[in-house]
Structures are given as structure tokens and as C-alpha cells.
Image (cartoon, rainbow, N blue to C red):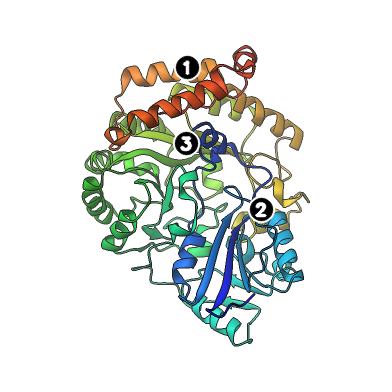
Amino acid sequence: MTSTSGYSLLLVNPKSRYNHYSVQNETASLLGKKKTMTPLALPLLAALTPKHYNITIIDEDIKPLPDCIMPDIVGITFTSPTTGRAFEIADHFKTIGSTVVMGGASASFNQEETLKHADSLVVGEAERIWAQLLHDFETKILKKIYQSQQQFDFENTPVPRWDLLDTSQLMAFPVEASRGCPYNCRFCLTTKMFGNKQRYKDIDNVIEEIDQLPEKRMMFTDDNLTYNKEYALELMKRLKPLNAAWTCQSSIEIAEHDYLLKAMAEAGCNNIIIGFESLNPNSLAQVKKFHNKVEKYEAAIDKIHSCGIYVAASMIIGFDSDNLNDIDLIRDFILRNNIFHAQISLLDAINGTELYFQMKNENRLLNINKEYKCGIFPSLKYKNFTSMEIFDKYFFLSEQIKSYENVTQMAVRIFNKYRFTNAMDTKIGFLTKFKTSFVIIKNYLLTKKYRNNRNSNVTFVCCRI
């Protein structure tokens, strides 16, 4: 409870029972880590919290909640798959007398349900209202809902409190240079949360944040880091001396800008996640993904690979124009273009999106537990196939693209044709390489499971050391 030196604040990221395979926690485990990356929200909230608070951050993927902790106030961020666990945590702390505040996209668009478990709810961005919420908590006038009347300008933010987490258990760290997205895809929640005009952080602020990371391995969480080419190029110039290794998200049009791709590679970019979403032009049009041109996909991938940067492809199956044969086309596309990291998801309609309201009006939302809404289980009444048909086809596709034989063949083709470098390669010491190799050999290559996997074509995780 309240100490003589101030208040105790617990910030929690709940554990998910089911993860999409793209989360790669298994890969993290092979490399001796607990998690690939933790959400940025909680270390950032901690940085926005007044100094008279004693702050604890718990990411349940890294460490469990202590049994006998009694904080004055608890902040919980959650997504659809972690909803159940988030409510369990909230109910527990309310029972023992803590004040519970919940936030994040899922909370913002499921307010009535969330307020059954929370004393207060942060809707949308927290930067402008967090200090007021804490003041109201201290003076016992806490409101049910806090929502800023205007967007945070985002030009400057405090450095996240990474000192409050066991960062040795993370493979990479999230960094946010911009917020918002200029596009308005019907299945995406970004513009509903952050608007369709990108706001940019001062580059000095970005570099300061990166300088203070425990390790220079990061992912830019921006929905489209390279939309503003002038900003992106200046950021690359500032990143280059830092000897960092990083990944980002971008739209496919990045392939049209050779100078920027070259600058990104020189600045340490090793992977670009691109939302291809579909190989069916009709499906792209239905969800307003007008900037994607299917006929340009393969040339774009070749261009990015030729610059020494991997392409990770985000694909969605289950659009109204899709049929089962389209899923086979996705498999052929992935294998033909040597895409090791294909993030394939079943279409979901997230509350707050245009697609959600369409599916709701058409009575096509399945009443399933939210912990299954992680992209690998059917959540809608699909137009051209049953839930079981698409579920079986999805897992068959996943097994094929991750099989030992196919991954090996892609590796041979891509490494024979392209040269990939990493700005941090020279910083990886012999001991780290030895320990990593030992863990992989011990936990995978020397096991009976590995030998069975080779015979049965089950999932094989390809990772670059």
C-alpha cells in the first residue's frame, strides 16, 4: 500500500495463452531469451509518471506476477488475445483494494466490458492525460474514463524506463519515430487510434532514445517508417554511426526509392515488414488497400533483397473475394520469392474498424473467446469457405512454408543470389556465438523431435545468427 515516500504503481502486460507464430517466442527461447520484444507502452508510461511513485513493471512473458504484491494503483494494457488474463489480473487487484486502470486499443474500443473490471479507463493516447489521472487518483476524484480531446503532438517524448525491466531476456527493443498512418485499410485499427496523418518525433529525441537502449537491437514500431522520405533519409544518416541492427514496417513503394533503401541498409536495417496482404486485386480493393499493386510485388521483393535487406511478408487470408485456391497461390508466392518470415493470418474484424461494423451488420462475427483472436483461429463467417476448411488449409500452408525442405531450398537460393550484411555483425563476440550455437544444437539439432520433424515436414524455425 502507500508508503511514506509516495505511491506504488504496478504496470502489467498480461501473458497470452495463444500467440501467432510470428511473435517468435520459441526463437527467443532457442537463443536463451524469454521474449522477442515487449510493448513500448509500459516503459513509456513509467517515464511519464511523477518521481514520487515507486514503479514496478511486469511483463508476464518475462516473469510472473509476485504472489504478495499490494500496489496502490495498477495499470494494465492488453490486446484481444490477452483480454481474459487482463481481466483476471484486474479483478484480483480490485479485490485486495488496489485501484485498477486499463488502457490500450482493446480497452479503448471495448469500454463497457473493460469498465466491469477497471476503476478507470484510458481511451486512446495516454500522454496528455496520464498526469491528470494520477493527480485525480491521489485526490480521490478518479473519473471512469480519461480521453484526450486532442492528439499528442509527439515531437518529444521521455526516454522509456527500460531500467525497470529485465532487458537481458529480450531480443530487441521497440522504438517509435512516428505515429499514425496515411492509409485507411478497412481491417486496420491504426487510423482509428492515432489518425491518418503521421506525426513525427524530433530526430534528436529518437537518437537520444536509441542511445539509451540496453542494446542497439530494435524494431521501429511505426506503421510506415519511410512514408516521409525526407524525414526517413535524415533519420538514416543519424542512425548510421550508431552501429545498430533494426527492422521496420513500410509500404511496398519503398522499393521505388533506391537511394533510401541503400541508406537504410547502411544504417543497419536488416528486415522490412511489408503488408502485401493479398495476391487478389479484388480483395485489396475491398479493404481499401489501393496503394498495393500485385503486379509489382515480385520486382519489389527482388529490389529490397538486392540491397541486402530481408523482406518479411504480411499476408491475410479470408477476404470475401478469396477462395481456397488463392491460399495455394500464396504458398507458391512465398516459396518462389524466398520469404523466410511470412506472417500469414486469418482475417479478423477488430472492434473499431470499418470491417468490424460491416461484419456485425451482416451477422458474420463468431462468438468465440477473445484469447483465440490472435490471427490463427477463424473468427468470422467467411464467404467462400467454412471455418474448418480455412482452418485446415491455413495450417497446411503453415507447415509447407516452414518445412525443413522448403526453408533449406529458399536459404540456398537466396544466399546464392544476394549478400546480406548487418551493421552489428562485428559486435557479436565469440562467446555469444558459441553459447547461441550450443543452445540451438542442444535444444533442437540433437533431439529426437528434430529427426521426426525432418520426416514429417512440421514447422522449422529458420533464424540468422
Kindly report the distance in space between the C-alpha atoms of the residues bearing marks 3 and 2: 25 Å
Residue ID for mark 1 = 408
Q: Which amino acid, mark 1?
A: Thr
Please give the name of the residue rendered at 65% of the width and 57% of the height, measured from the top-left corner. 66
Kindly report the distance in space between the C-alpha atoms of the residues bearing marks 2 and 1: 35 Å
Residue ID for mark 2 = 82
Callout 1 secondary element = helix
Left or right placement of residue 60 versus residue 168 in this view: right
Kindly report the distance in space between the C-alpha atoms of the residues bearing marks 3 and 1: 18 Å
Q: Which amino acid, mark 2?
A: Thr
One can see residue 20 in this view: yes
Query: Mark 2 or mark 1: which comes first in sequence?
Result: 2
Residue ID for mark 3 = 313
Callout 3 secondary element = strand
Near-viewer residue (392 or 127): 127
What is the x, y in percent for residue 297? 41, 34
* Residue depth check, mark 3 versus mark 2: number of the one nearer the observer: 2
**Crowding near the residue tagged with mark 3, few <14, some 14–19, many ≥20 C-alpha atoms within 10 Å:** many
Query: Mark 3 or mark 1: which comes first in sequence?
Result: 3
What is the x, y in percent for residue 424? 30, 37
Q: Which amino acid, mark 3?
A: Ala
What is the x, y in percent for residue 129? 51, 77
Callout 2 secondary element = helix
What is the x, y in percent for residue 1? 65, 74
**Crowding near the residue tagged with mark 2, few <14, some 14–19, many ≥20 C-alpha atoms within 10 Å:** many
Determine whether 119 is above or below 432 in the image. below
Near-viewer residue (382 or 76): 76
Q: Quadrant of the C terminus?
A: top left
* Residue depth check, mark 3 versus mark 1: number of the one nearer the observer: 1
